[in-house]
Image (cartoon, rainbow, N blue to C red):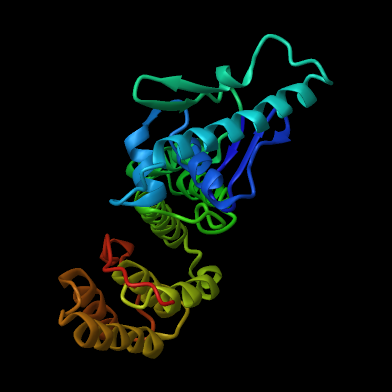
Amino acid sequence: MDIGILGSLTVRERGVSITPTAPKPRQVLALLALRADQAVTVQTLTEELWGAAPPRSARPTLQTYILQLRELIACALRQGDGGEEGQRCAKDVLLTVPGGYLLKTGQGANDLRDFERLAGLGFRAMDAEDYPGAAARLSEALDLWSGPALADVSAGFHLETETRRLEESRLCALDQRIEADLRLGRHRELLAELTVLVSRYPTHESLCGQYMLALHRSGRRGEALNAYQQLRARLVRNLGLEPSAALAKLQRSILVSGPAGAPAPAATPAAGRLAPVG
């Protein structure tokens, strides 16, 4: 089974889509796919679909959605075998387990697992100061994203929580990939990307720090200092907070270095306060 989470939901069994178009069965499949090869309880699925006040018909309705998914799986198994379903049946793929259900994926592709593997390699390369390796692995990980996770799925409490977690994981990988590129002297190449990112995340201190470094190393010291002042104004106005000590130190370093100077990469803040626009 091939699973795509990092963008639109795509689930294929033997190359045939089993992704339903109806919103609630799609929601069920999304949660099962997100937790592939792990049991998802009936209670969790019920909370996802109906929140804290499910209807009396919740359990039989959920069973109907499971039946619909199994019908799609059975059809995919038949088509994938050229009309012969073979040894496996739908209940071997979407299992009933004590207290819930489990989507058994086998050896197929899973973009979330690939992202986590590649990002992990990238983080370890950063720790080892292997900046070319870190930049390459983290770029591969980020290229797996085609949009926000599960962008075309209506989300309840559990999916909303998971998609926020995945977005934070993506931002962490992005932060470290940019840091690796800065260490490699790619500041001019980063300017266009960072201009978009600081506009999208206007109070994210790490991205702002990286933007300041890229600007300063590109001979745009005034713009780097202005980026700090804009961030500070937003933090004070929106959150009642001053910039972190690390970002303030970077600002002072740029201020005293003069037009030809370049503060060390280590001055970049390690993390930022996040408040995306829109």
Name which residue lies at 41% across and 76% down: 198
Residue 131 visible: yes
Is residue 148 positioned above or below 262 on the image?
above
Name which residue lies at 44% across and 75% down: 200
Quarter holding the C terminus? bottom left
Q: Residue furthest front?
A: 56
Q: Is residue 140 left or right of residue 180?
A: right
Towards the viewer: 110 or 267: 110
The spot of residue 19 in percent (x, y) is 63, 42
Towards the viewer: 114 or 80: 80
The image quadrant of residue 100 is top left
The image quadrant of residue 42 is top left
Towards the viewer: 271 or 86: 86
Name which residue lies at 48% across and 32% down: 63
Q: Is residue 172 left or right of residue 91?
A: left
Residue 109 visible: no
The spot of residue 125 in percent (x, y) is 40, 41
The spot of residue 226 in percent (x, y) is 34, 89
